[in-house]
Every structure is written in structure tokens, then in C-alpha cells.
Image (cartoon, helix red, strand yellow):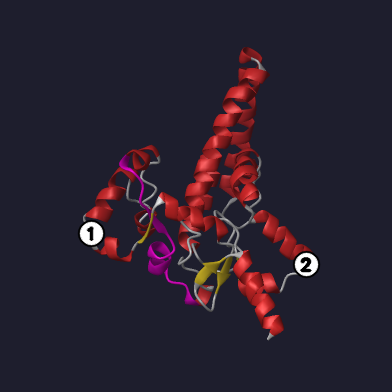
């Protein structure tokens, strides 16, 4: 991963997690509210539905994110100049490294071994990030009503996994602690959670089997303050049309 550019994007996400505004896709998975989805044209809705489908989000999306999206300095906001230049230097260095490896090992071997590892990593990373912010009772608010503490605790999950998987993933399952204070090192996240019993009460605890339901979370319902599926949205639309 291109560290400087990715870190700046991730820091932006930490400072704006859950804000419903035009930059909500920086360092995050784009999400529409029910009203925003309703206002789209037929093709706009179809495009969003394809984007939020499981094959795109969890198979094609991770490959795109690792191989393409993370290589393009597409963020043109003020203050990103150094990060953009660092990304271009990073890309050039990677090109030299992979060209050399391809010449030494053979491009077929490089692709058959290294490419699946990259894609598999991307799938795991995107899945973890998705369930930690796209759970049903997450937190979303417009900029003038947004609260950092609520965004950190309510807008993130405590992904309760076996200890081995916490270790393998750098304890990122304690995502509420990570968002509350990103300076806490990964090896102290679990201790921060367990030494403060209040987190057991207020954290959005979710197990692996429970997290599978998050796949169906597609739209943010501002009235009910929760995520809903496309199926629920269209069922409501049909009911209101009949009424």
C-alpha cells in the first residue's frame, strides 16, 4: 500500500467518519441515504445497486482497490500535494521492482503467486472495514449535527472474533477503540477495551456469523436511524404506492 497517500486518506476517514456530505467516499465505502437513492434516475439507482452488490464490493472491489484505485492520486483537495507526489514515486518504484522480479522469476510465476495473495488480502481488508462501519445501527449525521465520540463508538463495531484472528488482523476488530483514539497501538487495543467495562455495554458487539447480515445493508434510513436493505426499501415503496 502507498503509505503516505493511504495514511492521509485514512486519517481523513477518522476525522469525518459518518458525516453525510460530498466527501463521504474518501477512505470509506460510498453510502447513500434513502432520500438520496429515491432522488436518483433509473440508471443512477441501477449503478448504485451494482456497486453495492456483494460480488462487486467483496470480489471485484478489493482487486480494483489494491491494483487500480490505490495507484491513482484522484483526491485533489488542498493539502494533499505531498501525498500525491509520494504516491507517484511509490508507483514508479513498484514498477521497477515488479519488472525486475518478472525478469528474474518469470511473469507467469509472479502473477500466479503474488496476484492471488494481493487479491485475497484485499478481500479480507475490505470485509473487515465493511462490517466495522456498515452495521445496522451505525452512526450517520449531516455535518452540522455530527459528533466525534458518537461516530467513533456507535459508528464502529467491536468485531468479536477468536483471539487468534484478532492477533492475525492486528486487533483491528476493536475498531471502536481505534476510532476513539487512533494513537493507541494495535497491541494495546484489546487491553483498552477490557480494562474499561463501559465498552462492553456501549460497543456494537458483533460476531462473525452476525456480521454476515451486514452484506444486506445498502441504504441509510434517516427516519429510523439504521441501515436497510434494497429489499426493504422497495417493499416500502410498493406499500406506499398502493396506499
Residue at image mark 2: 42
Name the residue: 67% across, 76% down.
Answer: 237
Please indicate whether residue 24 sits to the left or right of residue 186 in the image.
Answer: right
**Residue 102, picture quadrant:** top right
- The image position of residue 183, as x and y in percent, is 35, 51
Span colored in magenta? 145-163
State whether residue 4 is above or below residue 80. above
Name the residue: 64% across, 72% down.
Answer: 235
Residue 196 marker: 1
- The image position of residue 216, as x and y in percent, is 56, 59
In this view, the residue in front, 238 or 114, is: 238
Rounded to the nearest angstrom, the CA distance separating label 2 from label 1 is 48 Å
Residue farthest to the top? 104
- The image position of residue 178, as x and y in percent, is 37, 53
- Number of other residues with Cα within 10 Å of mark 1, as a class: few under 14, some 14 to 19, many 20 or more: few
In this view, the residue in front, 50 or 30, is: 50
Asked whether the viewer can see residue 1, the reply is no
Say which element carries label 2: helix
Amino acid at each position: 500500500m502507498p503509505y503516505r497517500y493511504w495514511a492521509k486518506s485514512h486519517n481523513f476517514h477518522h476525522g469525518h467518519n459518518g458525516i453525510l456530505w460530498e466527501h463521504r467516499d474518501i477512505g470509506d465505502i460510498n453510502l447513500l441515504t434513502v432520500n438520496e437513492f429515491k432522488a436518483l434516475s433509473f440508471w443512477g439507482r441501477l449503478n448504485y445497486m451494482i456497486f453495492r452488490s456483494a460480488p462487486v464490493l467483496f470480489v471485484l472491489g478489493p482487486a480494483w482497490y489494491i491494483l487500480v484505485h490505490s495507484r491513482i492520486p484522484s483526491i485533489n483537495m488542498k493539502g494533499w500535494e505531498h501525498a500525491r507526489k509520494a504516491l507517484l514515486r511509490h508507483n514508479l518504484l513498484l514498477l521497477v521492482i515488479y519488472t525486475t522480479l518478472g525478469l528474474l522469476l518469470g511473469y507467469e510465476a509472479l502473477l500466479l503467486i503474488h496476484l492471488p495473495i494481493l487479491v485475497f488480502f484485499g478481500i479480507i481488508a475490505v470485509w473487515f472495514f465493511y462490517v466495522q462501519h456498515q452495521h445496522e445501527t451505525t452512526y450517520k449525521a449531516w455535518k452540522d449535527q455530527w459528533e466525534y465520540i458518537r461516530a467513533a463508538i456507535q459508528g464502529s463495531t467491536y468485531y468479536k472474533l477468536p483471539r487468534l484472528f484478532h492477533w492475525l488482523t492486528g486487533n483491528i476488530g476493536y475498531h471502536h477503540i481505534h476510532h476513539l483514539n487512533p494513537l493507541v497501538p494495535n497491541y494495546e487495543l484489546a487491553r483498552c477495551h477490557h480494562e474499561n467495562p463501559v465498552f462492553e455495554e456501549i460497543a456494537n458487539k458483533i460476531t462473525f456469523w452476525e456480521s454476515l447480515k451486514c452484506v444486506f445493508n445498502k441504504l441509510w434510513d434517516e427516519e429510523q436511524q439504521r441501515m436497510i436493505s434494497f429489499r426493504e426499501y422497495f417493499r416500502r415503496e410498493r406499500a406506499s404506492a398502493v396506499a
